Image: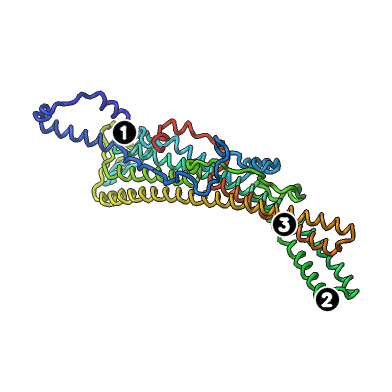
Amino acid sequence: MLTAFARLNYGLQPVPDSALRHASPAVRLLCALVLTTLVGCAATPLPALKPPVPQAWRNAPTATAPSPAQPDLRNWWQAFNDPALDALVQRALEHNLDVKAASERLLAARTLYRHSNDPYLPSLRFDTNQVIQPDASASYFIVGFDALWEMPLFGALKSTQRLAAGNLDAARANLQGTYVTLVAEVARCWVSLRTAQQQAKLLAGVRDANQEKLHLLQLRAGLKLVAPTEVASAKAELANAEMALTEPQRAINANAQQLAVLLGQSEPDPAWLEGGAQPQLGDWQMTHAPADLLRTRPEIAAAEAEVLRAAGEAGISRADVYPHIGLGSSLDWSVNLLTERRLIRSGDSIFSAGPVIDMPLFDWGMRMAKARAQKHGLKAAVYAYRQAVLQGVAETETAMGDLEQTHVRETWAQQAAQALGENVSALGKRRSLGLASTLELQDATIAQDNAQLALVSARAEHDLAYVSLYKALGGAPQPPVNVAADYKALGERKETK
């Protein structure tokens, strides 16, 4: 309907002012009504969305490549070079129940979107009715057809399309958000699981070293070479080492069970509990991150969809203020069943057709209030969109800063562990030459194991900061459900961008 009006307007020739001045009042009134209708058919313009993104990231590392490549948002977890993690992510994307539920909600929104024009198509209804005259002198059985075609005037069609497109965009953003959260959680649980297993292994070594140290001190105490306080201190250190072993075991159980939930199964795989190497990024660094990457965040896409929904609701409320105009027709056939206790089987039919006008009168003030309220709702949605962008900027900046600092921390922790490892090697050689005692070697071994524990923790923090950064950027594979054809069908996608 809107397109037909536009084409008709292009085909009209300008009317001279003199012709309008000499026209009859009826013609002038008709022209005014036509112009008013044409103006009213236009939907409310969509507000311009100008996301307040920074020109450059404040915490972004300095680019080391002359032409840095775009970060890989769809397969970012592959930077860990861990085939087991790659397989877990793939299994989670295929079997996670939250993904399946979000996919069904998207399909539901997609189905409704395809029929968003249906309220403004001609409708035909068949009905039957029984009528008794007020004086109880006759009864009738009526069969008929009613047809109605409501004209989508005053922007009603475009507003309805916007509302349906907003619902569809929101469902897509929800599915993409489920993907982002799922991939990030699988990576986080896997890193935490392998980290806890490495910590358990190192803490077991610290416990064994403390046991050997306690044994040596007890022997020396029996020879009156050390004070009893040193033996008591060694017992306390051994108890603390035994107590520290419970924390990684708790983390192993919790993360293994959470992985099972993410993969849509009730129990963890036994292979997860066997232990393995801790994932690590190595020398990976992000050298390029355009601010436009924020548009991939599902939270921002959902806020943008809410603006579109609010615009549709505001347009529909605005259209409800004006009369609803349509064309209607009916064909009824009646059978006179009974008249004054005599059965009469006679029938008559009648056809009617004409315009249908539904004009608000006594509730017009309420409709105006609703239209104004929806207008304020649209402004609120725009502000919420801008807030979502600011929140995305803050999370990304924080994640970039954390990634850089944890990388520095991992580097220093690695140097400390390497230095203490060299110390243990040197003491081992001195002990073989009789220049150092076994007790000194045990103390150095405990210090080395503690340094390795610090390195494992620093490496895990670096890995988790990397996961947080790509979650902040909305990194995840694209859902397999393709709705591009739906957007093309109504041409709404171009308007929303």
Residue sitting at the far right: 223
Does residue 354 appear to the left or right of 431 in the view shown? left
| Label 1 element class | strand
Q: CA distance from mark 3 to mark 2?
A: 30 Å
Q: Position of residue 37 (x, y in %)?
A: 24, 36
User: Which residue corresponds to the image point at 25% horizontal and 43% vertical from the top-left?
Assistant: 359
Q: Nearer the viewer, mark 3 or mark 2?
A: 2
The residue singled out by tag 2 in the image is 228
Amino acid on which the number 3 mark rests in the picture: Leu
Numbered-mark total: 3
Q: Which mark, residue 453? A: 3
Residue 304, image quadrant: top left
Mark 2: give few (<14), some (14-19) or many (20+) Cα within 10 Å. some
Amino acid on which the number 2 mark rests in the picture: Pro
Residue in front for this viewpoint, 139 or 169: 169
Q: CA distance from mark 1 to mark 3?
A: 83 Å
Residue 439, image quadrant: bottom right
Does residue 139 appear anywhere in the picture? yes
Q: Position of residue 192 (x, y in %)?
A: 67, 52
Amino acid on which the number 1 mark rests in the picture: Ser
Does residue 44 appear to the left or right of 77 in the view shown? left
Q: Position of residue 201 (x, y in %)?
A: 77, 55
Lower position in the chain sequence, tag 3 or tag 2: 2
Does residue 257 appear anywhere in the picture? no
Mark 3: give few (<14), some (14-19) or many (20+) Cα within 10 Å. many
Does residue 350 appear to the left or right of 472 in the view shown? left
| Label 2 element class | helix
| Label 3 element class | helix
Q: Which mark, residue 271? A: none
The residue singled out by tag 1 in the image is 330
Q: Position of residue 486 (x, y in %)?
A: 46, 33
Mark 1: give few (<14), some (14-19) or many (20+) Cα within 10 Å. some
